C-alpha cells in the first residue's frame, strides 16, 4: 500500500534539492516562500486526491472497492446531503472540501506565473487541474483493475463552484489594488 506518508517522505528530499537550487540561483526570500507553499500544497493535494494507492492486490482489495464512477450531475451530491446516516462532518468534508480544495492553487498561480491573472488563463489552469485529478484517479483504477477512487462529475461541479468563488474574490482584490494605484 502506498499511503500518503510515502508521498511526503519522497517529497522532502526533492524539496531539499529544490531549496538548494533556489539558494544557488539567489532567489528572493519572498519567491522561495511562495514556491515552498506551492510545492507543499501540490504534494498535499496529491495526498488527498490520489492516495492511498492499494498495491497489495488481493489481500486488501476488498477494503478499497468503492462504488462505481458517477457521470450523472448532482447524483452523489444529493446522495451525500440526503443520507441521514452520514454525520454532518462527513457531509461537510465531502461537499465543502471539493469546493475549496483547489482555491489555494488558484491563489498561488498568479504569484508563480506573473501573467496568469486574466480570466482565460485562470480558466485553463482550472480546467486542467480539475480534469487532471479525475483522469488520474481513473487511470490508476484502470492500472489496478478495480475502482479504488470514484471518478465523479459532481467533484468537478463542486470544483467549478470553488473556481467561481475564487475568481470573484480575486477580481475584487484586483479592483481594490487598482483603485489604490
Image (cartoon, rainbow, N blue to C red):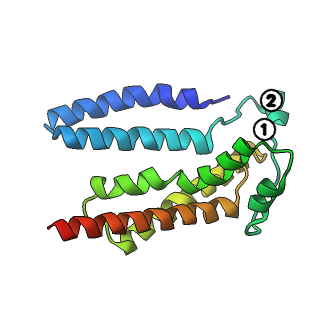
Q: Horizontal and vertical percent for residue 127?
A: 51, 66
- Report the residue marked by disc 1: 64
Instruction: Find the residue positioned furthest to the bottom.
Output: 120
SS at circle 2:
helix
Report the residue at 27% width, 38% height from top: 33
Q: Which mark is residue 136?
A: none
Q: Horizontal and vertical percent for residue 178?
A: 21, 69
Res. 69 visible in picture: no
Q: Horizontal and vertical percent for residue 121?
A: 37, 69
Q: How many marks?
A: 2
Instruction: In the rendered view, tell whether residue 174 sits above or below residue 31.
Output: below
Report the residue at 70% width, 56% height from top: 151
Quadrant of the image containing the C terminus: bottom left
Q: Is residue 48 left or right of residue 120?
A: right
Along the viewing direction, whichever of 61 and 68 lies nearer the viewer: 68
Q: Are marks 2 and 1 in contact (CB under 8 Å)?
A: yes
Along the viewing direction, whichever of 52 and 78 lies nearer the viewer: 78
Amino acid at each position: 500500500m502506498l499511503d500518503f506518508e510515502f508521498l511526503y517522505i519522497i517529497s522532502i528530499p526533492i524539496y531539499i534539492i529544490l531549496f538548494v537550487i533556489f539558494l544557488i540561483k539567489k532567489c528572493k526570500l519572498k519567491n522561495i516562500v511562495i514556491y515552498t507553499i506551492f510545492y507543499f500544497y501540490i504534494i498535499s493535494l496529491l495526498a488527498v486526491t490520489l492516495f492511498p494507492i492499494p498495491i497489495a492486490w488481493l489481500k486488501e482489495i476488498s477494503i478499497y472497492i468503492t462504488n462505481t464512477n458517477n457521470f450523472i450531475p448532482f447524483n452523489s451530491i444529493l446522495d451525500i446531503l440526503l443520507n441521514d446516516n452520514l454525520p454532518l462532518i462527513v457531509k461537510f468534508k465531502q461537499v465543502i472540501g471539493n469546493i475549496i480544495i483547489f482555491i489555494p492553487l488558484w491563489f498561488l498561480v498568479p504569484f508563480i506565473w506573473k501573467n496568469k491573472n486574466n480570466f482565460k488563463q485562470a480558466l485553463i489552469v482550472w480546467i486542467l487541474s480539475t480534469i487532471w485529478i479525475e483522469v488520474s484517479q481513473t487511470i490508476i483504477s484502470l492500472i489496478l483493475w478495480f475502482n479504488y477512487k470514484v471518478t465523479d462529475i459532481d467533484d468537478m461541479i463542486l470544483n467549478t463552484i470553488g473556481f467561481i468563488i475564487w475568481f470573484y474574490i480575486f477580481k475584487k482584490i484586483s479592483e481594490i489594488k487598482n483603485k489604490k494605484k
